[in-house]
Amino acid sequence: MPAPVPDDALDEARRTAHAEAVAVRQAALAEAEGLRRAAEAEADATRRSARADADATHSQLAATLAEAREQAAELIAEARRTGAAQAAELTEEIQRQQDASAARSARLDETEARLDARDNRLDQRAAELQAQAAELAALKDDLDRRLRQLDADRGRLTAELEQHRAELERIAGLSAEEAKAELLAGVEATARREAALLVRTIENEARAEGTERARSIVVEAVQRVASAQTTETVVSVLHLPAEEMKGRIIGREGRNIRSFEAVTGVNVLIDDTPEAVLLSCFDPVRREVGRLTLEKLILDGRIHPHRIEEAYEESVVEVDELCLRAARDAVADVGIGPVDERLMPTLGRLKYRTSYGQNVLGHLIETAHIAGVMAAELGIEPTLVKRCAFLHDIGKALTHEVEGSHAIIGAELLRKYGEDEAVAHAVEAHHNEVQPRTIEAVLTQASDTCSAARPGARRESLESYVKRLARIEEIASTRDGVEKVFAMQAGREVRVMVQPTEVDDLASAVMAREIAKQIEDELTYPGQIRVTVVRESRSTEIAH
């Protein structure tokens, strides 16, 4: 922004421009006059020869004078125009500066007013702080006085307490440590009783909230999976077209039956059963191969050692194809996606494997469906859960070939063929050889239990059944205060009768929990076992 031009400077510029114009005009006139005089002198000297030149010079002088007059007029006009423009600019600039000065003055007034108000508030706050400081000082003095009084009271009370303790020890005949031990024993008994009450309350609440939901999920899963179970044994029965076929099977001096048993590894039992023979073998796949071999021999009619070997080789190929087809059908049935082709023969062999009379491959299919339903009910994506449940017993196809638990064997086999780690973990944890860490492992356990514990799905030998009942009664009988123990409902419920004078209600609840925990840790059984502790009090009087 240019500096403002004063009016005096403007007038001075105008006077300077006018003086310059006058000086120019006077200089031009003086120059013209000199030229005229020179011309006249020259004309006088050369009048005779330069009349014509004098006239030309006169004309030139007139033109010069005219030009000088025009230049002077232009300078004057330009000076006037320049002075007017500068005057207008100066006036506008002065007005802007005046407006800015007025705005700054207004802002300064406003700032000054705010500062005044702030000073007033600070003064007021300072007065309040001074008042609070005085009040705090008074409170501090009061607290110091009270602390001194408390110290004095504490000393006095300590002395009185020592006197009272000495007097109590003298009266009670107990030291402080003995009284403390007796008090702690009473508190411990009370705490145990209250803890038992709290545990029972929490268990009742959890049972009320969780039982109904769990029951609905399990019932829904079981109702939606209704698989037919066939009871299979280690013996296969083969019907004969005629009774004389038994002699041909035995052969001359038992040659055919010995050759058959040596080639197939299956024992042939021929008894008085009409038109039937029994094939016995622990390996179900080998037993099926033997059954097909004997069927081919009976249909062909030629039974001799060489033909037995040929029929056996054909039956092995046929059983392998049947196992592969059964595995593929099972995978397609459960809908778990592709399975490594190297696992298919092992899965197919489970078609001929049974557990407690339950077909293992059918058990896998049923378990996978139950697990899928449970996962859907819980809002979990069912494919991975079904895959875990379907493959959980794959190790049973190798238990007679590899040492170890079928769960660990199956997990190692799945890892070997690149199966997902979550599936391998669920397989190795479904019998608690490894602690389950995922929801898939827990659901695999639950679905396996549902399929195995369904009435009619499995059966067990009489010897193991009797041993389990005896062990259950032994576990319950070892508790203090137990009078009688009854294993009921085929070992699915245990009733423990206790002495009411030795075991109270809370101890009964603790005993039931401990017995159930020990049964879980020591025994293997399908389904669940209910433990009921009965405490009965009777009072009898005789009226004479």
Image (tube, grey):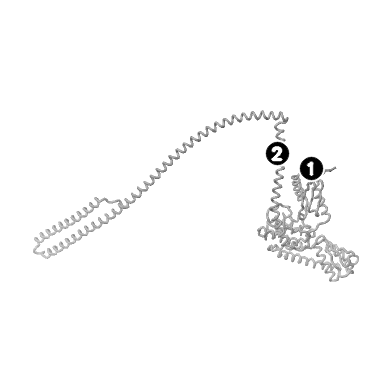
Instruction: Label 1, secondary structure: give it.
Output: loop
Give above or below for 153 relative to 99: above
* Residue 161 sits in quarter: top right
* Residue 338 sits in quarter: bottom right
**Residue lying farthest front?**
544
Circle 1 residue: 501
Give above or below for 145 relative to 220: above
Going by the numbered disc 1, the residue's amino acid type is Thr
As rendered, which of 39 and 384 lies closer to the eye? 384
Residue 419 seen in render: no
Going by the numbered disc 2, the residue's amino acid type is Val
Q: Residue at x 83, y 53 (%)?
A: 466
Q: Earlier in the sequence, mark 2 or mark 1?
A: 2
Q: Position of residue 541 (x, y in %)?
A: 82, 43
Using the numbered discs, state the Cα–Cα distance from disc 2 to disc 1 in whole angstroms. Answer: 22 Å
| Mark 1 burial class by Cα count in 10 Å: few <14, some 14-19, many 20+ | few
Circle 2 residue: 187
Disc number lying in front (2 or 1): 1
Please state the total of marks drawn on the protein image: 2
Q: Position of residue 167 (x, y in %)?
A: 69, 28
Residue 211 falls left or right of residue 19: right
